[in-house]
Image: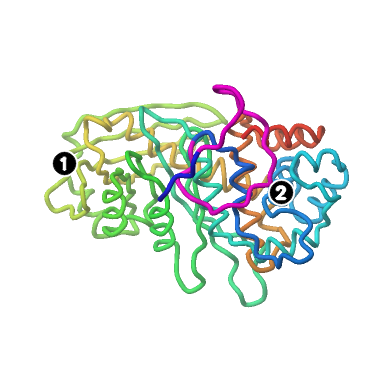
Amino acid sequence: MEVPTPSVRPGNNARAMPSCRISAPVRTPVPDHEFLCDLLGRIPDPRRRRGVRHPVGALIAVAVCAVMAGARGFTAIGEWVRDAGAVAMTRLGLERGSVDESTLRRLFARLDADRLDIVLGTWAATRTTLIAGRRVIAIDGKTVRGARVGATSAPHLVAALAHGSGAVLGQVAVSEKSNEIPAARALLEILDLDGAVVTMDALHTHHDTAALVTEARADYVLTVKANQKSLYTQLKALPWARMPVLTRTERGHGRRATRTIKVADVPAWIGFTGATQVAQLRRTVTRKGRRTVEIVYLITSADARTAPPELLATWVQSHWEIENRLHWVRDVTFDEDRSQVRTGNAPRVMAGLRNTAITLLRLHGHHNIAAALRHHARDTDRPISLFLSA
């Protein structure tokens, strides 16, 4: 897609604080100098022009800042706006007074959630770090349980998280009559995967998914568990006892975890596009004298030169950052599963804003998101300054 012409900014490398007032078509990928504030101003406004007081980008910006200060819903966002005052809102592009929760509720219910997630994700992608010279991306899904209305299913969202940085690179919704597998493929198609590594759990270990990743010039790491009986049995039958083993033991939180990995060249009967290696991963956890053992198998298109056993094991272990650093935080810290936001696209939009708040906080060195929310709640200037510099 076409890349927008860079904006002229003061000085050679200086970055001036923007305001949220741009209205232009969204184009991806996003240049790494673009401010998040500028990009949000390009989200299409679903409202009629008559009577519109505030730019759509400014309203989204306000909501992101409020969420960084701990707001969980529209009422809390409206209260944060009132407490912040007119001067603070002017910094975010609201020049015609305050904004009430009903305005945000109506806007977010109708907002183009697909476009919003693309903008937020492509911006985050320009801020991610590399692991051993590559971007490593975890894909996994989560249900927003509190948004269920009557017989209608709760929205199920599939997200992409950058290993290491914890930045959320994208999000798509699962169609009501579908499942997570095609949604994950749709997400992969909108991500810039060139040169990346994609980690996915056993649900997504399918030939079509592997082909999609390799066609995007990326590598995959797919997990095979016992519920995939035939493939699991075939992999289990390989002569693992004759293969070299790499072992790593970690202690902490009252437990001892030992992980071993054995890697082999891919057998001829593996039909996954581009597959070069298979691996056996054993995880033994001892807690209070009780030991549990889990054995899974891996299929990857990353070769032994670029993905030696220790790096492959790291990728697999880091995959669960998407559960621990994103889904768990949204559930526990933001209490997402009890959210009363249920109308139209609003549940997905709010989930996207939580993703963005988590991304912003992690990129600025906050490891404990609950503590970071309290820190930003104590001073209105903190979330606003962080947002405008992003």
305 is higher (above) or lower (below) than 140: above
Q: Which amino acid does label 2 sit on?
A: Ala
Q: Residue furthest bottom?
A: 151
**Quadrant into which the C terminus falls:** top right
8 lies left or right of 276: right
* SS of the residue under disc 2: helix
> Image point 36% across, 45% down: which residue?
193
In the rendered image, residue 174, in percent from the top left (x then y), is placed at: 49, 64
Label 1: few (<14), some or many (≥20) within 10 Å? Answer: few
Looking at the image, residue 128 sits to the left or right of residue 69; the answer is left
Secondary structure mostly seen in magenta is loop
In percent of width and height, residue 85 lies at 87, 42
Residue found at the far left of this picture:
268
Residue at image location 67% in from the left, 72% down from the top: 149
If you read the primary sequence from the N terminus, does the residue marked by circle 2 or circle 1 appear first? Answer: 2
The residue stretch that appears in magenta: 6-31
The amino acid type, in three-letter code, at marker 1 is Pro
Element on which disc 1 rests: loop
Q: How many marks?
A: 2
Q: Could you say where residue 243 lies in the image, as x and y percent from the top left? A: 18, 33
Q: Do the residues bearing badges 2 and 1 touch, measured as CB atoms within 8 Å?
A: no
The answer to whether residue 31 is left or right of residue 96 is left
In 3D space, how far apart are the residues under numbered discs 2 and 1 (Cα atoms)?
Answer: 60 Å
Disc 2 packing (10 Å; few <14; some 14–19; many ≥20): many
Mark drawn on residue 58: 2
Q: Is residue 320 above or below residue 153?
A: above
Q: In which quarter of the image is residue 244?
A: top left
The residue carrying mark 1 is 239
